[in-house]
Image (tube, rainbow, N blue to C red):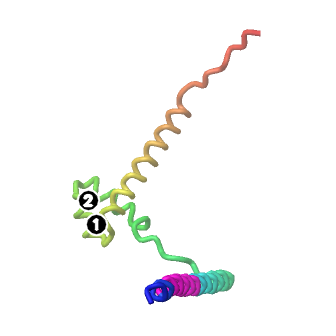
Amino acid sequence: MPVQGKVKQRCRLGCGRLMLNVIGSVAQFEREMMLERQREGIAKAKGEGKYRGRAPTARAKSDDIVRLANEGATREGIAKELGVSVASVYRALAAARSEAAGQALRARQITSPSRSRISLE
């Protein structure tokens, strides 16, 4: 009797593992099919000019973010007033700083005299 019990238990464990793998594979297949249909729908909508994606909210308000920051408003206050996240406020301010730094660097390169290399040939 004890031998039969162990055989049934092994079969149950193996059968359970098999069923789990089958169900997992079916779920993965369904997910991939859903994503494929979604990609096809997006491609069709883009072809018809109906799909543009999500409108950028914080980037559209970056001028207001910089203005309020220059006026001395807190990051949290700016976020609350404009309806964007605090992280978006920090991101917009960092982008504005890097853009200003890039413009300053380009202006400095234009006004500085060019250095020519001396050839020792």
Q: Nearer the viewer, residue 72 or 56?
A: 56
Q: Is 28 a magenta residue? A: no
Image quadrant for the C terminus?
top right
Which quarter of the rendering shows the N terminus? bottom left
User: Residue shown at 60%/81% (left/top)?
Assistant: 32
* Callout 1 secondary element: helix
Q: Position of residue 43 (x, y in %)?
A: 66, 81
Q: Which residues are magenta?
A: 9-27
- Disc 2 target residue: 75
Label 1 neighbourhood size at 10 Å, few (<14), some (14-19), many (20+)?
Answer: some
Amino acid under label 1?
Answer: Ala
Q: Nearer the viewer, residue 4 or 119?
A: 4
Above or below 105: residue 14: below
Find the distance from the CA under tag 2 to the CA under tag 1: 6 Å
Q: Secondary structure at mark 2?
A: helix
Label 2 neighbour load within 10 Å: few <14, some 14-19, many 20+: some
